[in-house]
Amino acid sequence: MSCVVGEDLTMKDVIDVMQLQREKSKQAISVDYREVENNFVAVRFIFECGIKLDAQPLTIATAAILYHRFFKEADSSGYDSYLIAATTLYLAGKVKDDPLKIRDVINVTHNTLNRGAAPLELGDEYWNMRDAIVQAELLIMRMLKFEVTIVHPHKFMLHYLKSLEGWCEKDDWSKMPIAKAASAFLQDFHYDPAILDYTPQHVAIACINLALQCYGGQVLPTDEGEGVPWYSVYADDLQKDKLWEIMEKIMEVYNKEPK
């Protein structure tokens, strides 16, 4: 197998996705979370707070998945999405052995919701919030039947990218920042509960293939011609229609970004 740089893209407006991704990465995080409350924005809240807490990337991804899994079982109108978001961060730290102190979680999430606010003193508001997170953690654990171990697409993506790099000519691979783009797509897909609908292997392949499409790259033999598609080496159960369905779901995330 080999990798080549092509001119033609096979998905309409796919370059627009990369432009949206670039614009999104340039924007400073300055959302006033008190003005809007929905699951997309709540996951953005998780990412912002996770970065401020210096949490590991997989810890933040775990929190996002736990958040989506919880609201897959629960009525979103019945719970404070930001309380659940804060709690999934605290819980994810335990799951990934990346412990986050509950006082730090409280102060960071409170300050992020209330821009410019001072850290909470050890008074009623602090203890009420601490108790709320502890109770919400128990609720999430019960709702998820204590099944909080998550297999992430990240490790599969790393393996696939390493293999693809070996197949490609060095100069061709260096022309296309496939790894960076695929990682960005994977991170952004965590904003959408649709990530729960697919296996981590399939998600990893879809992110890589979308990155290849955006940069006009092809791994030969391709699924557009004769022969076995490159991704069948890693997932022989992944059909072309399913692959493109996942890619379209990833692209839809950018249309959900609040204006």
Image: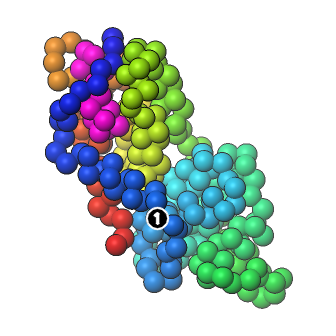
Identified at 63% across, 59% down, the residue is: 50
Identified at 52% across, 56% down, the residue is: 64
Q: State left or right for residue 148 relative to residue 201.
A: right
Q: Residue tagged by mark 1? A: 27
Q: Position of residue 178 (x, y in %)?
A: 41, 33
Q: In the rendered image, which quarter contains the N terminus? A: top left
Residue closest to the far right: 122
Q: Which residues are magenta?
A: 210-222
Q: Quadrant of residue 45?
A: bottom right
Type of the residue with mark 1: Gln
Q: Position of residue 171 (x, y in %)?
A: 41, 20
- Near mark 1 (Cα within 10 A), the count class, few <14, some 14-19 or many ≥20, is few
Q: Does the magenta segment cover residue 212?
A: yes
Q: Position of residue 194 (x, y in %)?
A: 36, 52
Out of 94 and 220, give the one closest to the viewer: 220
Above or below, 197 relative to 153: below
Q: Secondary structure at mark 1?
A: loop
Is residue 142 at least partly visible in the picture?
no
Above or below, 46 relative to 174: below
Q: In the rendered image, which quarter contains the C terminus? A: bottom left
Q: Position of residue 245 (x, y in %)?
A: 24, 42
Out of 171 and 57, give the one closest to the viewer: 171
Above or below, 226 relative to 105: above
Q: Does the magenta segment cover residue 178?
A: no
Q: State left or right for residue 197 relative to residue 229.
A: right
Out of 199 and 252, give the one closest to the viewer: 252
